[in-house]
Every structure is written in C-alpha cells, then in structure tokens.
Image: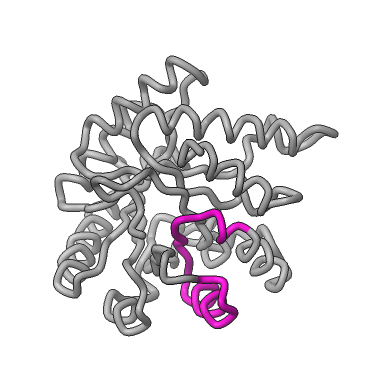
Amino acid sequence: MTPTTPGRPPALVAAADHRARGVITFERYDEYLRALTDVLPYCDGILASAQPLADLRASGALTPAHGTYLSLNRTGLARSAFEADDRLVASVARAAADGWAGVKVMVRIDLADARTASALEMLGRVLEEAAERGLEAMVESMPWVDGRLCRAADDVVRAAVVVHDMGAPLLKLPVPAVAAGRARRAALARVTGSVGAPVLFLGGPLPEAEADGPHAHELGRQALLEEVADVMESGAGMAVGRRLLLDPAPGELAKQLSEVVHRR
C-alpha cells in the first residue's frame, strides 16, 4: 500500500530514521527493532535508514503491503554545528536496487541560512532520479528558524508550498503549533489546502510538558490520539516515530492510532 495516494485511505507510517541523525532514543538496537516489530502490523508503511530497513525485512517484520521508504540524507546530526548541512548518505539507485517502494529526503527551509539553496538543489536532483526509477519521494519540509524547528502556521505553509511546487509527490510536515481542537483543525486544513499532493503530518518528540511525571505516558497517548483525530479531519495521514516507539506498549498504541486513522 502506498501511503495516502488518491482514492486510498489515510495512512499511518512508522518514522524510524531518527537514530541515524544522532537522536538516540534507544541505545540497545534489539530493543529498537522490537518496538518497530510491535508497531508494524498496524502501520501502512515505514520510513527508515538503511540498516533498520534491511534487518526488519530479514526478520519478516515487513510485508508486501508495507510502503517502505529509505531515508537518504542524515549528515545533519541533531544539535551539531553542522545540523543544517544535511547531505545524502544513500541514493535513489540504492533504494531501487534494494527493492524499497520509495525514498525520503528532508529539507530545512531557513530563510536566513544560505545552505537552504543547496538543500533545495539536492531535493530537485532526488525528485528527478526518483521519477526516472519509478520510486515515490516523500519530502519532509521543515521550517527552520534560529537553528530549530518552527511550527508557526505561516512557516509550515511556506515549507509545504516550496517543495510541493518543485514536484514533491508526498509531503511530510509538522503539525502547526496552535491550540488543539477547532483552531488546530483549521490550521491543518490550511496546510493541506495549500498543496495538491498527499500530506503526512509528523508526530515529533513527546511534548516537554508530557515528558515527565507519574502520568506522562497516559497524557502523551491522549494528546497524540487527539492530534491524530484533528489530522484526519484535514484529509491527511500521520508519520509517527518517537511518540509511538517510546510508549511502554508501542504495539497497543499503534493499534489505537490505526483505528483512528482508518476510522475502524
């Protein structure tokens, strides 16, 4: 199944390429693979870097129904001096040779950083190569201000429009930072309405207010489920990583998310 293609239901995609960017949510690799294996039965696809994808396929955790996306650019390590210098570490050719359904590439849209121009040039090449090989390209377009993600609605719309009009066939975008409920649904609809391609909104890390305390996981689950419900109203899908995988019972949470996404 290819996520959120026209005529198909919204998708739930497991986002599993953060360790390659230096975000070590799981130090033990076997625990990381176990969490991914638990959630995959409820997910329509996965985006990941090279080794996790290969190991999940070897273990039988991936099925022909899963959309599989190889993450291409991971040099921009989190919190490093070169975070915005995010170059290719894998190629479209490798994704095709390994039999993946598509590729995923991230670009940071920072109007104050001249490296944004090179990132967009790289994206243009990836889009052309993916089209030539018949692979889908998932483009994560991140509004970037002062060295960090900016989730202001205006910036999210700009980031979406720029890569969409370059030809991105599938977008992955942050949820605008507005109050939950009607305001958030309106902002999400504004983002999806600014483009003519399917959108996956990213789950991101656990909000700081929910990261600690005796009921942190329960609060985190509820907040995520409410966010996904708002996203579904906009006609988009979800790509969730850390907020799903770090749950004490990631498979159970993935099942709940799948029920919301597919309205079962």
193, above or below 57, in the image = above
163, above or below 123, in the image = above
Which region is colored magenta?
39-62
Percent x, y of residue 239 = 46, 49
Q: Choose between 77 and 98: the one closer to the eye.
A: 98
Percent x, y of residue 52 = 54, 73
Picture quadrant where residue 193 is located? top left
54, above or below 6, in the image = below
Q: Choose between 233 and 91: the one closer to the eye.
A: 233
Picture quadrant where residue 68 is located? bottom left
Tell me: 216 left or right of 10. Answer: right
Percent x, y of residue 106 = 36, 56
Seen at 19% across and 75% down, the residue is 133
220, above or below 63, in the image = above
Seen at 36% across and 74% down, the residue is 100
Picture quadrant where residue 237 is located? top left
Tell me: 164 left or right of 34. Answer: left
| Residue 61 covered by magenta stretch | yes
Percent x, y of residue 61 = 57, 71
| Residue 72 covered by magenta stretch | no
